[in-house]
Image (spheres, rainbow, N blue to C red):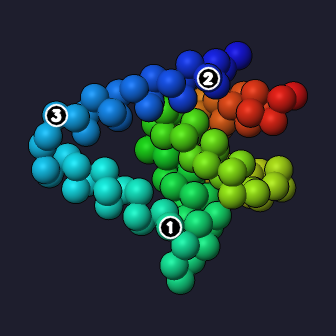
């Protein structure tokens, strides 16, 4: 079981702490990270799905959580999630299976299942 509120609170608290450090390079990177997922030639929804696939392949569960959370906000359907998970499995191979399990768990928690 995933504690959604705890993960969101931790991420928010730590991001504030990191940005408060005053380091301009860190602040610039965080700003770029926010901007790159905004609507452009690709929709924000598509970009978040791309981020989710990359996170699964790179095996970063904190990133998987974040992108699932954002994908839900962008209106990604269950079928779209499952296709994205399939792409990640093909690219990343069987080593990504534990992270796809985690993704299903997160999706269930966020969806309230």
Q: Is residue 26 left or right of residue 92?
A: left
Marked residue nearer the N-terminal end (3 or 1): 3
Q: Secondary structure at mark 3?
A: loop
Question: In the rendered view of the protein, which quadrant contains the N terminus?
Answer: top right
Q: Secondary structure at mark 1?
A: loop
Front in this rendered view, residue 101 or 51: 51
Residue 45: % across, % down: 64, 64
Q: What label sits on residue 38 in the rendered view?
A: 1
Q: Residues within 10 Å of mark 3 (few under 14, many from 20)?
A: few
Along the horizontal axis of the image, is 111 left or right of 50? right
- Point out residue 76 in the picture as x, y percentages from the top left corner: 75, 56
User: Depth-wise, is mark 3 or mark 1 nearer the camera?
Assistant: 3
**Labels 3 and 1 touching (C-beta < 8 A):** no
Quickly name the residue at label 3.
21
Residue 2, position in %: x, y? 66, 20
Q: Earlier in the sequence, mark 2 or mark 1?
A: 2
Q: Residue furthest bottom?
A: 41
* Dot 2: element: helix
Disc number placed over residue 5 in the picture, else none: 2
Horizontal side of residue 57 vs 103, given as left or right? left
Viewport quadrant of the C terminus:
top right
Residue 21 percent coordinates (x, y): 16, 34
Determine the residue positioned at 41% across, 57% down.
34
In the rendered image, the vertical position of residue 15 relative to residue 6, given as above or below: below
Residue pictured at 81% horizontal, 36% vertical:
111
Instruction: Tell me how far mark 2 sits from mark 1, CA to CA.
Output: 24 Å
Q: Residue furthest right?
A: 113
């Amino acid at each position: 079981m995933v504690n959604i509120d705890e993960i969101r609170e931790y991420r928010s608290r730590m991001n504030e702490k990191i940005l408060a450090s005053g380091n301009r390079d860190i602040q610039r990177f965080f700003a770029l990270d926010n901007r790159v997922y905004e609507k452009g030639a690709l929709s924000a929804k598509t970009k978040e799905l791309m981020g989710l696939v990359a996170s699964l392949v790179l095996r970063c569960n904190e990133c998987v959580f974040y992108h699932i959370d954002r994908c839900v906000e962008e209106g990604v359907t269950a079928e779209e999630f499952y296709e994205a998970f399939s792409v990640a499995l093909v690219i990343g191979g069987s080593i990504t299976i534990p992270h796809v399990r985690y993704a299903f768990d997160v999706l269930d928690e966020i969806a309230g299942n």
